Amino acid sequence: MGVGVMMVRKAAAIAASMLMLLVFVSINDDVSQFLASLKYGNAKPALAVLTASQTERQRLLSIISAEADKRKIDPVNARIDRVWKAIPGYNGIEVDVEKTLEAALLAPPANTIQYVFKEVEPKIKLNDLGPYPIYRGNPNKKMISLMINVAWGNEYIDSILKTLKRENVKATFFLDGSWLNKNADIAKRIQGEGHEMSNHAYTHPDMRALSRQAQSNQISKTEALLKSTLNVNNKWFAPPSGSFNQATVQIAEEQGLKTVLWTIDTVDWQKPPADSIIRKISMKLEPGALILMHPTSSTRDALAGIIATAKTNGYALGTVSETLSSKRIPAAVEGAD
């Protein structure tokens, strides 16, 4: 057989193969997706798409889409409450149809569909509400925070930190600026254990009794110290003794801070017995609660019981930033599965 004939036959075979491939691609566009995935190193999901029939894909997509409607939870907008003032929003969740379908195509045929969820933020967020004080988190979010205001009481901080570490709980410490200036090493230790550091004015004043400029100085001086000493990008201001007026809230807002108060006060500075504090918390605990305390002997003795009470009742414990965030508690997302 001549060389020319062999070359013609080889060319014809190649042409026929290419023609078959083009026909197949025109029939099933998924092949082009598969070839593209080889180019970009993502062959596994595309291979599943390639090998799954269009009928199977449509069957899974129909099931997932129908189930997505049932499992959707709408987000809750942040709002102004007549009593509680600014209340944060809470993210909704919905099924990520594309990722769920991809996972279903990769799974063995007999497997139950594992739904993949994504969070949906509310249209109105806490920062959209303007200068209002905050007393609590969203009531749909079963998380609480321990707010520890520090202007004195160094002798109890070590025990408090040990309890928090043992219980794997992160708190938010609101620091008096003059205390921070004298106790930078203690503050760095608190921060080093993963706790949130925030602003409690500079000299523990009655903010409501101060001029606008004096209030501004109290907040800004401590804010500068938090930044220079601890490199903190802070979000919150807790007025000492809960004393504030609208000017206080406005001034804090101008400095990029939200004014935070509390839902439940331990009144630990009056040195109540630990068991009475625990009973009080147990009776008043609710989703989004911000629990006020100080580094006192009463808090030292009651802290483990407070945490145990919260955990026993199914509450997550987080920082003020975590509790006031619109993000869902991870367990809530898993529970929707």
Image: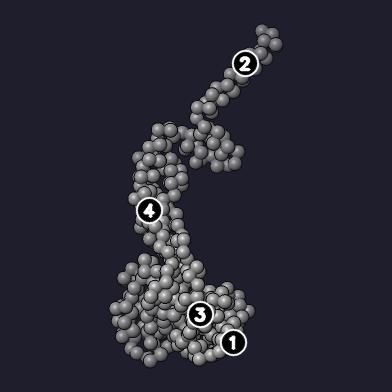
Sequence-first tag of 2 and 1: 2
Q: Position of residue 223 (x, y in %)?
A: 58, 80
User: What residue did someone put label 3 on?
Assistant: 249
Dot in front, 1 or 4? 1
Distance CA(mark 2)–CA(mark 1)? 89 Å
Q: Is residue 181 above or below residue 92?
A: below
> Is any atom of residue 9 visible in this view?
yes
Sequence-first tag of 3 and 4: 4
Q: Which mark is residue 12?
A: 2
Residue at left 59%, top 23%? 18
Q: Position of residue 9 (x, y in %)?
A: 63, 13
Dot in front, 4 or 2? 4
Sequence-first tag of 1 and 4: 4
Asked if the residue at tag 3 contacts the one at tag 2, i.e. Cβ–Cβ closer than 8 Å, the answer is: no
Dot in front, 2 or 3? 3
> Dividing the picture into quarters, in which one does residue 159 lie?
bottom left
Amino acid type, residue under disc 3 in the picture? Val
Residue at left 50%, top 91%? 209
User: What residue did someone put label 1 on?
Assistant: 213
User: What residue did someone put label 4 on?
Assistant: 72
